[in-house]
Image (cartoon, rainbow, N blue to C red):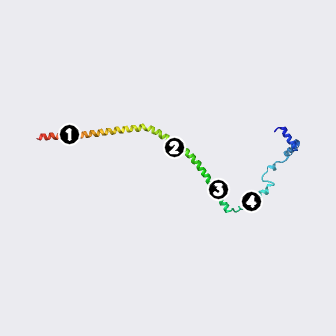
Amino acid sequence: MTTSDKDNEQESSGESREDRLEEIKKEEQEDASSYYAQGQGEEEPQAQTEQEEFNKSVPEVDKEKEEMNLLKAVAFLGFGLAALAIVFILFFIRDLDHRVGGVDQAVNNLEESVTPLREQVETSIQQVNRDIAGLQGKMTDFERMMAIVELKRALITVQEMS
């Protein structure tokens, strides 16, 4: 809107610039303290009625309305808690997915690092089993040899006696 448009509007509304300037000058001369004053003057009767209103007892509430309002409040609370639970579960499941994914990756890395150790332990156990079998064979052979030696001594003793 241009200045000329504003001038046209003011002139068409029946109010000239001079009239407007006179109104502004009157407002400057008026005391504005009454406009900004609080708790004084005309508001005192209203303050008394407010005080009386606060002193009155609260009217009785219809039991059916009270019960219905309580039911509504509990329903809103229930729906709110359900929505909060759904949001919590969704975030928890997403967080759980990230954690499980991380744990799965850690387990796979651990398996990869343990696999060579497991193979080494298995080969060592097989070697120990072979060594034990060899020792058992040697012990059996040694017992046989000792038995043969004892039998030969007994044979020699018997031959000398005869």
Crowd around label 1: few <14 · some 14–19 · many ≥20 (10 Å):
few
First in sequence: mark 1 or mark 4? 4
CB contact under 8 Å: marks 3 and 4: no
* Residue 161 image point, x, y percent: 11, 41
Local secondary structure at mark 4: helix
CB contact under 8 Å: marks 3 and 2: no
Q: Which residue is mark 1?
A: 148
Q: Front-most of 135 and 23?
A: 135
The residue type indicated by label 4 comes to: Glu
Distance between the alpha carbons at the discs numbered 1 and 4: 126 Å
Distance between the alpha carbons at the discs numbered 3 and 2: 39 Å
Q: Which residue is mark 2?
A: 100
Q: Which residue is mark 4?
A: 53
Distance between the alpha carbons at the discs numbered 1 and 3: 102 Å
* Residue 105 image point, x, y percent: 50, 40
Query: Which is more foreground, mark 2 or mark 4?
Result: 2
